Image (cartoon, coloured by chain):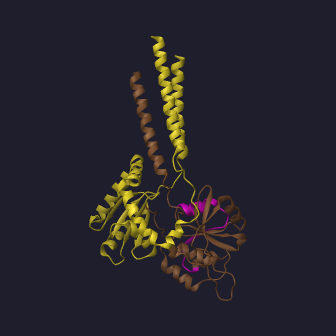
Chain colours: A yellow, B brown
Amino acid sequence: MRRRCGVMILAALALGVIMCGACQSAEPEDTRLHISIVGEKSDVQFQQLTAWFENSELARQVRYHKIKAGTAIYRERYAPNINGLPTVRVQQPDGVVIYEAAAEYLPGSAQALDRTLRRSILAGQLPWRQRFQQFRQRCCPLNQQQQQEQEPEEELEEELEELVAVPAPPQVPLFPWREVLMILGAGLAGLVGGAVWQAVEMYQE
Amino acid sequence: MKKTLAFVACACLVFMSLDWAVNSYAKLYPPEVPIVNPPLALRPRNWSQGRQENGSCMWASTIALLRWQEQYTLANRLRQTRGGGEVPSGFSARLAAAGVRHQVESDGSVEFLEWACRERYGAVVVIHGGAHAVCLVHMSAEAVYLLDTNSPKKYKRIPRQVFLRDWKKSGGWAFVPLYNPASPLP
């Protein structure tokens, strides 16, 4: 009985280590979403979309960005990564896109726009979905291929290269050794616990 | 019963490990640093005004943040009509007179700076004993990033404590333009 208790305590400790690691990695962050509407100033569809959105309740609950094509901000931060104009994009605070549509794929009425945005936000706010989309967006071979294709264009811009040479941001470990070791440790603890359990049962028989 | 419990425990462990692995992998790609990252073309260089030997760092920093927040007309108007050295006292009134929507704090509130960076606004802060003003564009637990209009091509990374000490010695003054900063990169 004591041994079984020991195994259970060991398993609980292993779980605790995992949960503790998860808690330590969670940083308090701002949770407001970003909604960007990007388009030509003279475009009727862009004007309609901005008017619809600005008059909606949702505009007061998120961070709204109205970006006009042709500006320096548009050229550097939006033009390389949108599929057409006008574009509506919903992003999580860390930049992960949870909804994006452009031109003819955009909703055709104020109600449809509001409904579409709310649905996308609801779906994007589910934690497992957030992580899955983040994972998919950054791991998908297609995305990697697209990034590689974009690199030569970026290399042409000398000034941007200088920006890349900015003093190094806070370093993030290249491989999550700590996490891997903890997972392996938890697995080992489970293995030892199981072996002990089996041995105890065999001994009792 | 034992088998069921063991199965549930194993399933929990597997799920948590997967969830954790995905989360850890995502963390390998940190978000954009600095948070406030105006394109090079939008960063003005400090200029001297008239007979004054000192520059216009306060106005240049203000203009950089206004352009980041898509206030090009207002920023260009300030560039043409304002300049020269400024001191924090009364600058808020001059900003208001120029039509700049803003918030000022002069009590050395670190929370105010953190809020300004988190909201992607950035802040104009006074350093070097009140002799210079720069844009605060990022704050982390270890370091801050500054955009100095004397050398606007690159950001300066300074240990957080060093910056905060200098800033507080200089009066702990900061102001934040309140418009429409750009969204994060996808």
Which residue is at a point 54% across and 52% down the rendered structure image?
Answer: A172
The location of residue B29, given as percent across then percent down, is 48, 54
Asked if B91 appears above or below A150 in the picture, the reply is below
The location of residue A21, given as percent across then percent down, is 54, 41
Image-based side of A111 in relation to A16, left or right: left
Image-based side of B93 in relation to A92, left or right: right
Q: Is residue A170 visible?
A: yes
Image-based side of B11 in relation to A11, left or right: left
The location of residue A132, given as percent across then percent down, is 39, 49
Q: Is residue B112 visible?
A: no
Q: Which residues are magenta?
A: B97-118
Asked if B101 appears above or below A189 in the picture, the reply is below
Determine which quarter of the picture holds residue B96.
bottom right
Asked if A145 appears above or below A156 in the picture, the reply is above
Which residue is at a point 52% across and 47% down the rendered structure image?
Answer: A26
Which residue is situated farthest in the bottom direction here?
B51
The location of residue A185, given as percent across then percent down, is 52, 34
Which residue is situated farthest in the top direction here?
A205
B171 inside magenta stretch: no
- Taking depth in this image into account, of A109 and B124 the one nearest to the observer is B124
Asked if B50 appears above or below B56 in the picture, the reply is below
Numbered circles on residues, count: 0
B112 inside magenta stretch: yes
Which residue is at a point 46% across and 47% down the rendered structure image?
Answer: B23
Q: Quadrant of the N terminus of chain B?
A: top left
Which residue is at a point 54% across and 72% down the rendered structure image?
Answer: B65
Q: Quadrant of the C terminus of chain B?
A: bottom left
